[in-house]
Image: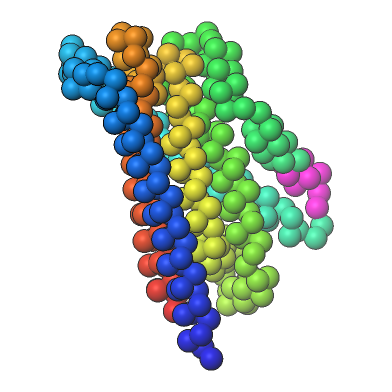
Amino acid sequence: MVGKPTNAFSTLERYIVKKRFYSVFAIIMLLFCTTVAYAEGGGFIDKFHHNFIADARWKYLADGLLITLQISVVAVLIGIVGGFLIAILRSTFDTIEKKNIFTKSINWILKAYITVIRGTPAVIQLMIIYFVVFASTNIDKVTAAFISFGINSSAYIAEIVRSGIMSVDAGQFEAGRSLGFSHAGTMWHFILPQAFKNILPALGNEFIVLVKETSIAGYIGIVDLTKGGDIIRSRTYEAFLPLIAVALIYLVIVMFLTMLVGKLERRLKTDGK
């Protein structure tokens, strides 16, 4: 009886992986067929050379990719730190029976913060951070992107982590306290490890969304991957190859990150058995 649910889950997991593979394969084939059709229009090699090789225009994509990855990694680290702190504070305040004016005020501020950040477009937040908040300073554009995307990510991660914490049985917290652990110790040693396993897929998806979301960094003049492709388009007056190249690079990044998250998730499931 114990083995049946596991087998059923493994079958479902293989089916999902297979469906994802078929979807990605179909997209790649569609792009390939579109490229072939474009090439038949004449001089694909010449157009490739004109768009990427001539004047070393491929460097716009390479340098832009590095900026995109840099912004994504730093922003998600800021988001994880801020999101975990907000989630722990909110979940703690929600479990307090006797709330005072201080805890109510902090909880209200955190709720308002999450509501505002999740309720406004990321591109508006980015422009406000750079053109309004730091308008009187000589802040680096990439640093402004770190802050903006980090703040945006923290609001989403906070709700993901809080839902994971609330999904852990309340008896786990009581057991930790009965063993002599403090509130912080119980949260660190008992609650968060169990919550992390539950929220890992959502955290991985948030990082993937964040990577694609950084494509708006060009609004404040950052030459990221998307902006690099657009610069090539403006120089060659050909939109197809530069934009397709940008799309394929994003697709490869997302596929790689999805594979890593899947492997980590399977490892955690194996360790938990």
Q: Is residue 255 above or below residue 9?
A: above
Left or right of residue 216, residue 242 in this image: left
Q: Is residue 163 above or below residue 137?
A: below
The residue that appears at 58% across and 13% down in the rendered structure is 132
Most foreground residue, 36 or 31: 36
Residue 205 position, x and y percent, is 49, 48
In terms of image quadrants, where is residue 154? top right
Most foreground residue, 148 or 104: 148
In terms of image quadrants, where is residue 151? top right
**Residue most toward the bottom?**
1
Q: Is residue 57 above or below residue 20?
A: above
What's the magenta bit mostly, secondary-structure-wise? helix
Left or right of residue 239, residue 112 in this image: right
Tell me if residue 263 is in the magenta stretch: no
The residue that appears at 24% across and 18% down in the rendered structure is 42
The answer to whether any part of residue 50 appears in the image is yes
Q: How is the image coloured?
A: rainbow
The residue that appears at 40% across and 46% down in the rendered structure is 26
Most foreground residue, 156 or 42: 42
The residue that appears at 44% across and 11% down in the rendered structure is 138
Residue 31 position, x and y percent, is 36, 35
In terms of image quadrants, where is residue 68? top left
Instruction: Please state, as top left, top right, bottom left or bottom right, where the C terminus lies in the image.
Output: bottom left
Left or right of residue 114, residue 23 in this image: left
Residue bounds of the magenta highlight: 99-107
Left or right of residue 270, residue 154 in this image: right
Residue 80 position, x and y percent, is 49, 45
The answer to whether any part of residue 133 appears in the image is no
